[in-house]
Image: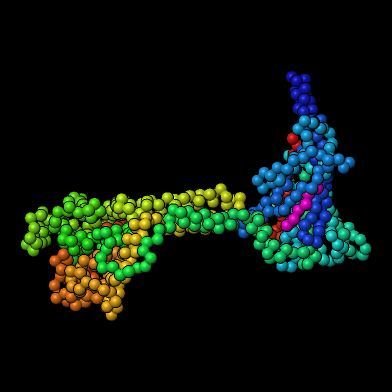
Amino acid sequence: MKKYFFICLFLFLFAFSVSAEEVSDFRQEISLERDASFVVTETITYDFGDLEKHGIYRDIIYKYNSQLGRYKLDLKVLSVKDDKGNDWNYQIINDGDYRRVKIGDANKLVSGKQVYVIEYQVKKGITFFEDHDELYWNVTGQKWEALIRQSVATVVLPELLEESQLDFSCYSGAVVSNSECVSKRFSYEGAGMVKEAVFIDDVIQTGNGFTIVMSFPKGYIEEPSFIDKVFSFAWSNWIIILPLFVLFFMYKIWQSKGKDPIGRTTIVAEFDAPDKLSPMEVGTLVDEHAGKAEFSAQIIYLAIKGYIKIIQDEKGKFFKTKDYVLLKIKDSSDLPKLEKLFIDKIFSRDYLETNQEVLDKTSSQIDTDYDIKMVRMSKLKNKFYNEFQSLKKTSYEVLVEKGYFSRNPNSTRAFYTVFGVLLIPTLYFLAPMLGPIAIVSIIISSLIIIVFAQLMPQKTRKGSVARDHILGLKRYLEVAEKDRLEFHNAPEKNPKVFEKLLPFAMALGVEKKWAKQFEDIYSGQNPNWYTGNTHAFSALALTDSISSFSSFTSSSMTSTASSGGSGFSGGGVGGGFGGGGGGSW
């Protein structure tokens, strides 16, 4: 039994010894230039042992996350040679944040000790602070597959510098370790004049690394201009210009898919709505939204046409609460699609109630054989929302059917809004890679799309002309009495004219101005379609009551049920630029 144990142990140790490849020596010379660039010459002695491999690869990290966003080094591989100056075959592979130098020949195998001399130039690798400038460089990186037996880094200065003007340090170990490396020293030329700094570390286990930091006085290294920094930041953070591309893209889409055709060249005063449109259609054509104002105006419109009677009802002796009762007093089967649907939705069986006193009183006042139906507005609160949405949807569809819009405005807005919102989940994937600037850029891009979504509903030529007619009507409705003489063939002032256009004034938001022009047209009596508690009745009093009704309607019928820093301050292994790792293949 012991015999087999020793045989297995021998085979295991033999296999381990055969496969134990390592970097026997890792040397890096960093030759600084005054323009803030430097050339790195890495001499890597790699011992494959008895293993036969094609060569090695060296991963150099060149993209980093900073506090504001991404930072990208300008890294260019110049050559890859052996210790005798002969060229190695190599290829450059960009892999995420790393630039891989893959050295060797797929048709050839090597073993034993091989020397690889990699020379590459780095720009933008110096960090500039207020009181000093700094080279903070990860010499080896932490991602080597083999241990590094020893490592030496030499920083060669572009010009001699007094020792008192320099500071330097080095770290060794696991990531963020602040344990110092084995040794560091200056090399001099003349009395106290430094020409280079040398950093030495011994065995670096896999997963560990070796980092150096060296500071210089301000002005020793040429700091890039503000413009250069801006371009550098934009180059590293290309996503910063994403909002500009999105803005341009959405503008071009709007020009072809959302911009309205030209209507009338001038806005001329009009005395009626075009094409026998209802107030809800009129308001929707102007602002491309079927909202609460249009909804209330439509009810008043149907009341004035004789299909509905509105009764203001107040309850309580001391603290009165206001409510409104709607009575359907006429058959609505002869109405256009949208108006009929309005009445059908409001006087649905689910909302009807019976108050015989009110019904009998109304029947005695109205000469009709129609079976009067009654709805109390307060009973619709938190229940009518879905019907309201259905009415909005139908109003859009009717305007498309009549040829005023090329597509359903609400569906158009929803399509682009969803597209904008879908950008947000990309933050989950891009933010860790691209930093905070990606979050800001994507959010701005998303908002641009959502804003343009509101502009994308497109009228037809017919719709644009109708809109301009409506704006002419609005001009007439809101003009002051003293300016009314400008209009030729304007209708006489009387209750019939006032009531006929009142719903359209409501839909266009000018009912107060319209009522002010008709202050004295009523003789103190309520119109037959409205019963209120106003004692001194007038057009303004009626409009105030209608505004109160509109607010009550909005709340009742449209509501829903509740449901990088310095290497000398907190520095350590893995900080700064450089780093990466390597292995064999």
Quarter the C terminus occupies:
top right
- Tell me the quarter of the picture where residue 165 sits: bottom right
- Tell me the quarter of the picture where residue 229 sits: bottom right
**Location of residue 307 with respect to 111 vertically, above or below:** below
Q: Position of residue 565 (x, y in %)?
A: 69, 59
Q: Residue at x 8, y 63 (%)?
A: 365
**Residue farthest to the right?**
190
- Tell me the chief SS of the magenta region: strand
Q: Position of residue 186 (x, y in %)?
A: 86, 58
Q: Residue at x 87, y 42 (%)?
A: 85
Residue situated in front as seen by the camera: 121 or 140: 121
Q: Residue at x 18, y 75 (%)?
A: 521
Left or right of 576 in this view: 167: right
The stretch in magenta equals 119-125
Left or right of 159 in this view: 420: left
**Location of residue 237 with respect to 227 vertically, above or below:** above
- Tell me the quarter of the picture where residue 271 sits: bottom left
Left or right of 42 in this view: 354: left
Q: Check if residue 522 falls in the magenta segment.
A: no
Q: Position of residue 326 (x, y in %)?
A: 18, 60
Q: Residue at x 22, y 62 (%)?
A: 301
Residue 474 appears in the rendering: no
**Residue farthest to the bottom?**
482
